Amino acid sequence: MVEHIQRIPSTGFTGLKENWRNDLIAAFSVAMVALPLALGIAQASGVPPMAGVMSAAIGGLITSFFRGSHLAINGPAAGLITVVLGATYALKDGSGHAFQYVLAAIAIAGFLQVLMGLFRLGKLGEIFPSSLIHRGLAAIGVIIFTTQLDDAFGFRYSPQAKSVLAKLAELPFRLTELNPLVALIGIVCLALLLIYPKIKSHLVRFIPAPMWVMILGVGAVLGLGLQNTFRYEMFGTSYAVGPSYLIQLPANLSDIIVFPNFARIADPKFWVAVFSIFLIASIESLASSKAVDKLDPFKRTTDLSKDMVGVGLSTMVSGCLGGLPIITVIVRSSVNVNNQAKTKWSNFYHGVILVVFIFLLAPVIKLVPLAALGAILVHTGYKLAGPRIFKQTARHGWEQVAFLVGTLAVTLATNLLWGIFAGIVFTFLFHLGISRMKLSDFLRSLYKPSIEVEPINN
């Protein structure tokens, strides 16, 4: 019996010629997932919604030619929402403007990633513990879940609390602030996301869940007339709805291009933003690239240093044109693999399709309710930090749950950067304790471990 061996797809233009059908079909599915996610990530990051779509397009059009991965998809990620949002708050000037300063920080962070790749430091991704990534993502999930409830359910007033934990505690007392029509859209969209995995229809499953949410949201807006401002009464209370509850796009599409402003380059807050974006984006991108390699049916491996150059260059371009940081994104990469993509050209095609979407669907995007995007992100946050994550962590030992809770608590009390640092310290101290070694011996063993192999029965 002869075992069937899959031939590894060709690279370059030969791979383009041989696999364009598979890659194009996969890219279309990826683009349908990427469009609503990119809009939602930008909205949650406190920047114009089209900044997310632009960076997703750049992630396909530019990164594909410089990176070291084969099936990964590049674009903006939910994991960077808290970092960009934090930079937006920190860099506001006297007029309340911050976006152009954040773009400058993104561009410099991309430059640092390029340097990281050129100095072959991508190998750091091989030694960085993946469990720490999961802890950080769980904290991000709680933050996303909490901050996006306002959009998903149409709360009429901003929360009084400042910390994430205080906002969660305040939530039950804010239910009277719901805008019923907006909340109805958010609840129905969230319900759709929850039942979608249970639907067996191939016709329904052909369109990804986030795109169905956008379609449902636009239908609700048109059906209820929410594109026009009006008031209605319910339960003896008057409520207002209108365009303010929809995605805001510039009247002229050329206005989506925004250039960075480097005027804050001497401000310490600016460099905190730069290094926060650089570190979190690099760590998450390297970890995601390793995860995508495990999904690759052809068992190809990513050149992590080359990948850093690719995402760094595209992040620089994105920051210079009004977009978000670009990394390797695991969910869209999974969609790419599951739809039988073969080469990096699927990432390029998905960028092309998104550019087409920008020009053809702009009038429709203006009708997407913020409640629909909020529902997508609330669902995303729940998946990152739901009970399933704690159950999976518990399978690896009680100490991993302790690390997760500790990292989560520090992150929610401070920020993501301090949370990851605390996670490293927790892990280090725990292993130092159970090793019962002197600190000097422990550090020496970390740098140069001594491994003994004893053969038993051959």
Image (tube, helix red, strand yellow):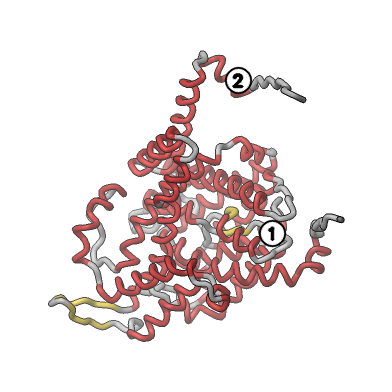
Q: Position of residue 32 (x, y in %)?
A: 56, 71
Q: Which mark is residue 31?
A: none
User: Residue visible at 59% across and 71% down?
Assistant: 354
Query: Residue type at mark 2?
Result: Ser
Residue 413 in percent (x, y) is at 33, 41
State whether residue 130 appears in this view: yes
The N terminus - image quarter: bottom right
**In terms of image quadrants, where is residue 320?**
bottom right
Residue 149: give x, y in percent of width and height: 32, 61
Figure check: 239 above or below 296: below
The residue under the point 33% across, 85% down is 225
Disc sitting over residue 64 in the figure = 1
- Residue positioned 36% across, 70% down in the render: 371
Q: Secondary structure at mark 1?
A: helix
Left or right: 135 in relation to 110:
left
Estimate the x, y position of residue 419 in percent, counting from the top left: 42, 39
- Element under disc 2: helix
Question: Which quadrant would residue 351 be assigned to in this image?
Answer: bottom right
The residue that label 2 is drawn on is: 445
Q: Quadrant of the C terminus?
A: top right
User: Marks 1 and 2, Cα distance to the nearest angstrom?
Assistant: 39 Å
How packed mark 2 is, by other alpha carbons closer than 10 Å (few <14, some 14-19, many 20 or more), is few
In the picture provided, is 186 more to the left or to the right than 62? left
Relative to 457, say whether 23 is above or below: below
Sequence-first tag of 1 and 2:
1
**What's the amino acid at mark 1?**
Ser
User: In the image shown, does 298 or 236 lie closer to the viewer?
Assistant: 298
How crowded pointer 1 is (Cα within 10 Å; few <14, some 14-19, many 20+) is rated as many
